[in-house]
Image: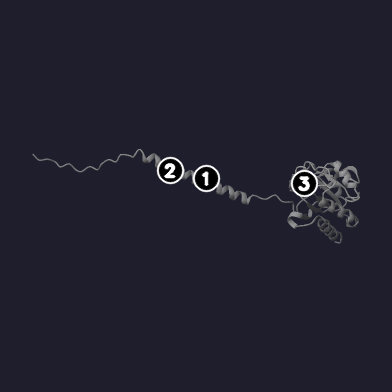
């Protein structure tokens, strides 16, 4: 009787019930971390390519607006469209009436008003001041001196349409008259707008490093050059 030799059978490996779930858990953790890094990277990249809000530039159409304004203490409704029918318009945004830089700017515009008139240009100041504050500011001989109007933009809709930013006044901040300032500060930017409604020049204290009185100087140069053509 012959005995058949049994072939060696490979041992069947038994899954390691302890290590397999741990391995899967580790893989899932690594995958989650990789996805998180990818998401963060994409988010940061998106932030860098998002357009940064900036004041409207020369060549763009100036947004039309109407606003309650004051000239020599007398209130009226200012219309940019109507003003442009007469010639170019200088629209200058400023932070607040009765504050040092804005007072200088208004005073300088008042001093040079006859030259703007000679160039056929209209001046209108815009801030978030209340119309009551502007009644006093527009008539004060040290500032606007009744020479040109200033308009109230309390909700900053006009400033926003020109892509301008605004910051909050510091708590308890007071103006040169000792009154507490309770409105936002619109950034100081001047727009010279042609009769066709196109922006001829944008002058920014932040971007162009201009002092308040230099806004007047630069705006006057633009309208005088335009008038000489």
Sooner in the amino-acid sequence: mark 3 or mark 1:
1
Between marks 3 and 1 in the image, the one whose residue lies nearer the viewer: 3
Q: Position of residue 167 (x, y in %)?
A: 74, 46
| 39 left or right, relative to 69 | left
How many other residues sit within 10 Å of disc 2, few (<14), some (14-19) or many (≥20)? Answer: few
x, y (%) of residue 102? 82, 51
* Pointer 3 with pointer 2, Cβ within 8 A: no
Q: Residue at x 46, y 45 (%)?
A: 30
Is the C terminus in the top left, top right, bottom left or bottom right quadrant?
A: bottom right
Q: Which residue is mark 2?
A: 26
Q: Which mark is residue 47?
A: none
Q: Earlier in the sequence, mark 3 or mark 2?
A: 2
Q: Nearer the viewer, residue 211 or 66?
A: 211
Count neighbours of disc 1 (C-alpha within 10 A) and say few if under 14, some if 14 to 19, many if 20 or more: few
Name the residue that disc number 3 marks.
185
Please identify the quadrant where the N terminus is shown: top left
Q: How many marks?
A: 3
Q: Is residue 211 above or below residue 37?
A: below
Identify the residue under disc 1: 36
- Left or right: 53 in relation to 64: left
The residue located at (84%, 53%) in the rendering is: 104
**x, y (%) of residue 67?**
83, 43
Within 10 Å of disc 3 (Cα), the crowding (few <14, some 14-19, many 20+) is many
Could you give the CA–CA distance between mark 3 and mark 2, rounded to whole angstroms? 54 Å
Query: Of 56 and 194, which appears nearest the observer?
Result: 56
Task: Identify the residue shown where x is 36% and y is 39%.
Answer: 18
């Amino acid at each position: 009787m012959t005995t058949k030799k049994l072939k060696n059978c490979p041992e069947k490996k038994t899954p390691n019930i302890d290590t397999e779930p741990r391995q899967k858990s580790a893989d899932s953790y690594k995958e989650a971390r990789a996805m998180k890094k990818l998401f963060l990277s994409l988010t940061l990249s998106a932030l860098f390519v998002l357009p940064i809000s900036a004041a409207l530039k020369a060549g763009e159409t100036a947004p039309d607006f109407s606003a309650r304004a004051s000239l020599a203490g007398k209130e009226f409704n200012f219309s940019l469209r109507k003003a442009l029918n007469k010639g170019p318009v200088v629209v200058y945004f400023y932070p607040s009436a009765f504050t040092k830089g804005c007072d200088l700017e208004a005073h300088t515009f008042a001093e040079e008003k006859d030259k703007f008139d000679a160039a056929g240009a209209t001046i209108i100041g815009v801030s978030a001041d209340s119309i009551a504050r502007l009644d006093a500011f527009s008539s004060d001989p040290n500032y606007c001196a009744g020479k040109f109007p200033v308009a109230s933009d309390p909700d900053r809709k006009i400033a926003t349409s020109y892509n301008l930013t605004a910051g909050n006044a510091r708590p308890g901040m007071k103006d040169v008259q000792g009154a507490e300032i309770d409105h936002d500060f619109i950034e100081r930017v001047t727009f010279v707008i042609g009769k066709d409604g196109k922006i001829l020049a944008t002058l920014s204290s932040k971007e162009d490093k201009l002092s308040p009185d230099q806004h007047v100087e630069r705006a006057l140069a633009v309208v005088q050059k335009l008038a000489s053509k």
